[in-house]
Image (cartoon, coloured by chain):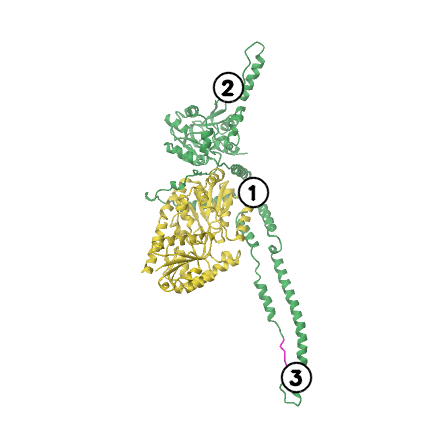
Amino acid sequence: MQLHQVLVSASHGDAVTNSALHVRALLRQLGESEIYSLHMEPSLAGEVLPLSALSSRPGRERRRDVIIYHASIGQQSVFELVASVPERLVVFYHNISPVDAFSSYDPGFAKLLSDGRRQLRDLAPRTTLAIALSQFSAADMEKMGYQNVKVVPLPVDLLPLATVEPHQPTLNHLVNATGHPVVLFVGQLLPHKRPDLLVEAAYVLANEVAPGATTVLVGASRLPSYRAVLERFVADLPGSGVWLTGHVPVAELAAFYTGADVFCTMSEHEGFCAPLIEATSFGLPVVARPFGAVPETLSGSGVLLPPDAGPRLVAEVLARVGGDVNLGSAIAGHQAEAMSRFTLEQSQKMLMVQLEPLLA
Amino acid sequence: MPRPDGADSDEAAVPVPPGGSRSAAAPPLDAAPPSPPDMDALMAELRAKVQERTREGIYTGALDGSLAAHFRRLASAHEPRDLAPLWDKLRRLEDVGGLELGGVDLGSRLPGGPALHQTANRLLNRYIDNLKSVVSKVADLADAVADVAAELVEVVSDPMSHAHPELVGEVEAVVERLAEYESLPAGSPGAVAELARRVAALEAAESRRQFHPWFSNQRFEEEFRGAREELLERYRSLAGWFRGGPGTGPVLDIGCGRGELLEVMAELGIDARGVEMDEVLAAGCRSRGLHVSAGDGLAELARSEDGSLAGLVLVQVVEHLSAQQVLDLVLLAYDKVAPGGRVVVETVNPQSLYVYAHSFYLDPTHARPVHPAYLTFLFKEAGFSEVSIDWSSPPPATDMVLPPEAAPGNEREASNVDRLNRLLFAPQDYALVATRPATGPATRPATEPS
């Protein structure tokens, strides 16, 4: 019996690809296991197989095998293939971003998202096992017709960040040259993550509460139209101390986590939110809004803002949590304890428990 | 002596050791669980603070909702125009009318009737054909007119669609800024003073932002700090001022650097603690058993209870501060030091021109020297008694201008050399020592800015 995984797209540093690689390492202890993907970065060729190779697998034993489909966006040809393979189907739901947030910026992308939800709904009847990264995502799956959804936290591998030497010039710059507190957001610059609200708070923070404070937003934006609006917004707010870095290599990310005073996300939709785990591993207190899986991942720790918090309140919270070392460490210490169950090993163990019945 | 500890910040700065990880500060997972901070209380406190500051007009006016509104404007300028309703209307036009051929019943029982009907039908159809081509042209025209009309209506109703979005954005920004100015409480000296204070803070922050060193403060100190013995000698003399203090609370050393002064005070049995902006230096102090926290010294001072300090000392710090921060420091010092307690401020002496050639500009974070007469004035105005100046670090005699050989007739030249030496080679540092009167008012005399 074999377990294989199917992705729409595979690229380095992508959370879905990373989790597929971690799952494969686990599955290979049991036997043969491959990752098949429709699109892939050229450097992953060999590591990841083209999706077309899946159909040409020898057919006799396929009914006994298992396909784990990582769902995060719609793709008609992948859906059709997954819907028709003879293998038993496991849907691993990474959550699909809300369509509404994207429709005005990129109708094409919004359509892919709504297609993704429709396709996922259609896959429900033939799915043997449904896995979500959080209770929040599990509830979403249940709305789409899945039953008995199992929750397995995202396998987050902290080792690369923990072992890399933080990029020294970046760190020196944060320590010596920027004003404090340094507020850090890590995540893609997409509408549902509400970086605009963080920029608003940064503007109030640097102008009214803690002069010279710095807010760093680390992460790529896959929507050029949204990035343009956000960049324009930042340019229109003089003295906001906002720094949009775009995507950065892991050594620079480690430097940002090391040099920051407080982590903040204003996101309104998260399937799990791995940066919360990363920030905690660097001893950073987290300030976040209570949406999506964020409260669940924080497990009662961190600072949850009221849902209606305006830029002034957010700025005051950031100034206090980022400026008071004792308070910051107490919050971060509580986070480390509350979130200690989110380890790569624990996630892999929980996944194995769920897959066990299929192996019999 | 340059001391690049960045002690010129008024923010709650928490620098992190280069190459070090904050994770070291987080408690190990097997330690006793820390009691979680009370977030509800924190949130309630900060909500109240926002309300209070809003009431007091501390925040810039016209901010409520205007940031979000501006973002929505920018975002809407990028939204593709929704043409669906227009297309619906145009499609409805297509359904209107339409003429069918062959409208005459061909069946007739009259002799020759069918032939007549056929002829009539042919004629009618020819008519209809002609009519249809006319109707089709009219319909085309109507389509075109409807199309143009729909576009026009849309363009007129939405300025974003025919004005360049960037231009609209600029106009909006100007309008917003004007609204801010209009909402300022005119003629309120408190508000103007508050604005001036904020501008000074922003300027200080901006000037720091412009300096981007890639070296560490520790390396800088190692390279340019004076010989340890010489330093200790100077510190012993400074520490002497805190012997036999009021006996309430510790002496606070703001910008304590590597903690040499704290060590000397410990040797003398003086209870002392330090604040250091650079976390690496602060951690180094703690590893040697000194009571040092990392952070912004002025903020730490402001947080201290009134009258809780036996003394306050700042060595080579005030030359890093803005003029406003020096003013604030003096008032804070009066409030926080117990009656009978001393404040010692050591800094470079701007009356020694030698300083400018040798040490002052060696440290790029030095903002401005503080004149001893001005500092004396400030401390006296703030209510301190017994304000005195202690000079130190004379330039080496070998650097001075040599007097002429003692000989009759050389007196004038000797006097000139002496004047020159006093101007050029005055002591490089001075320490202002001020004592808070033992029986003075509990808080400082009224010193509101005019």
Left or right of B398, for residue B282: left
| Residue B102 is one of the magenta-drawn residues | yes
Going from N to C along the chain, the mark reached first, 2 or 1, is 1
Mark 2 lies on a secondary structure that is helix
In the rendered structure, are the residues bearing label 3 and label 1 in contact, judged by CB atoms less than 8 Å apart?
no
- The colour of chain B is green
Write down the residue under mark 3.
Answer: B118
Q: Amino acid at mark 1?
A: Pro
Determine crowd level at label 1: few under 14, some 14-19, many 20+ residues with C-alpha closer than 10 A. few
| Amino acid type shown at disc 2 | Thr
Q: Which residue is mark 2?
A: B398
Is residue B235 or residue B124 the one in the foreground?
B124
In terms of image quadrants, where is residue A117?
bottom left
| Residue sitting at the far bottom | B111
In this view, which residue lies farthest toward the left? Answer: A360
Question: Considering only vertical position in the picture, is B258 above or below A357?
Answer: above
Q: Is residue A115 magenta?
A: no
Instruction: Measuring from the top left, give residue A171's x and y in whole percent.
Output: 46, 40
Label 3 secondary element: helix
Of residues B92 and A44, the one nearer the viewer is A44
Crowding at mark 2 (Cα within 10 Å: few <14, some 14-19, many 20+): few
Q: Do dots 3 and 2 share one subunit?
A: yes
Range of magenta residues: B99-103
Q: Which chain is yellow?
A: A
Between the C-alphas of marks 3 and 2, the distance is 133 Å
Residue at which label 1 appears: B185
Q: Secondary structure at mark 1?
A: loop
